[in-house]
Image (tube, rainbow, N blue to C red):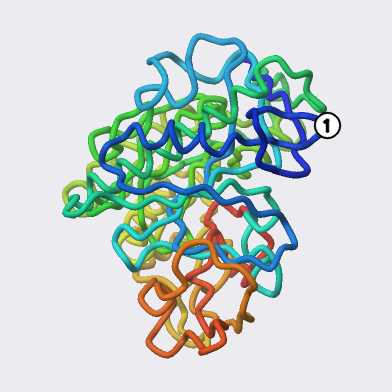
Amino acid sequence: MRLELGIIKIEDVQFGEETTVRNGTLYVNKKELIGLVRQDDRLSEVDVELTRPGEEVRIMPVKDVIEPRVKVSGSAELFPGIIGKIGTLGSGRTNVLRGAAIVTVGRIVGYQEGLIDMSGPGAQYSPFSQTNNVALILHPIHGLAPHAHEEAVRLAGLRAAVYLGKTAKDLAPDELEVYELNPVTDTTLPRVAYVHPLLSEGLLHDTYLYGVDAKRILPSLIHPNEVMDGAIVSGNCVSACDKHTTYHHLNNPVIKELYRRHGKDLNFIGVVISNLNVTLADKERSSDYASKLVKLIGAEGAIITEEGFGNPDTDLMMLCKKIEEYGIKTVLITDEYAGRDGGSQSLADAVPQADAVISVGNANEVIDLPPMKRIIGDLKRAEVIAGGFVGCLSTDGGLNIEIQAIMGSTCQLGFGTLTAGGY
């Protein structure tokens, strides 16, 4: 499979009479976009605001972030099984509005959405402070159940991303990224697999693979290009710091790095999609099956990432233990919840085999965020979102809050610069 990502660089976003891209600026017809989103009668109110890197803007509470894209060629449409028709992703050309993002805003469960600061000290913790953001402020009809509310917000974000992505259909890319897993003839290179568990705990902690809720799948072997081309969509409301947004899935840095090193110092042999479940039986079944697949494809090493914390720590350790018992070396990527002083146990579970662990930071670290001139959303949610607490919001709009509340601050895909070292 050969996937070409045609990168159209977006340097600014503005409202305009026509939704289009000209000279690096994305112009958005606000009325047209609101009309598209309002077609879902589960939403009572919709608004659109724009913000750019460096502005004194705070966005909260944020649900998901999606990169606008369009399939130019290939056998599938974007987000198949949810928005587009079913087909296999990972080949052909996909044009990408790099530097633009859809941000869905609005309270769903009230404590597991997050914030994005476009400037100030909080900006360095989130990659989405560096994107030109089209924020959808979404309000449900009265009495809408939480699962229906989540679905309506998820679909709104995806539809908006497809709508904006179509502006790139006929544009000539500024750059071309090519992903093709060519055979490696050097048999001395270690065969490395990537084990990618998807959050699937229910209770609004869900992820979708080709439109299928990951709770309903057995672990599967897929081509890395499928991940990079939109096969995985976030539907979860876990803590903002380690939520894998749809944007993260589309730009998975583990896959990018394995591709970069493929044929040089390792042989990247594929991706095993697993899930992160609730019951012990489901955890055992999934880790058994995933570790078996890693063995069957002949891996000598495996990178295992995580999403969330607490309950998923057990899945992570089960995968590590069982894959290591096959004689396959593992490296884990996780964040930590070590308390505000860093002195508490970092993970809820551990096994002796977990002796190569990369930490992407302590989510309990506290930061002071200054007030911002403009708020997109509702600042009052700061005291109830994960990482916030009663009294964390000052009268001038400043925040004293854990970085757990910042979107992507401790992303366990390594999408960022924060680290707490390795051990």
Relative to 30, is 106 on the left or the right? Answer: left
Q: Can residue 356 be seen here?
A: no
* Residue pointed to by mark 1: 23
Residue 116 pos. (x, y %): 57, 63
Residue 55 pos. (x, y %): 71, 63
Give whichever of 128, 20 is nearer the camera. Answer: 20
Q: Can residue 353 be seen here?
A: yes
Give whichever of 46, 144 is nearer the camera. Answer: 46
Q: Residue at x 72, y 57 (%)?
A: 53
Give whichever of 18, 177 is nearer the camera. Answer: 18
Relative to 38, is 249 on the left or the right? Answer: right
Q: Which quarter of the image is occupied by the N terminus?
A: top right
* Secondary structure found at label 1: loop
Q: Amino acid at mark 1?
A: Asn
Q: Residue at x 62, y 54 (%)?
A: 128
Q: Residue at x 66, y 58 (%)?
A: 129
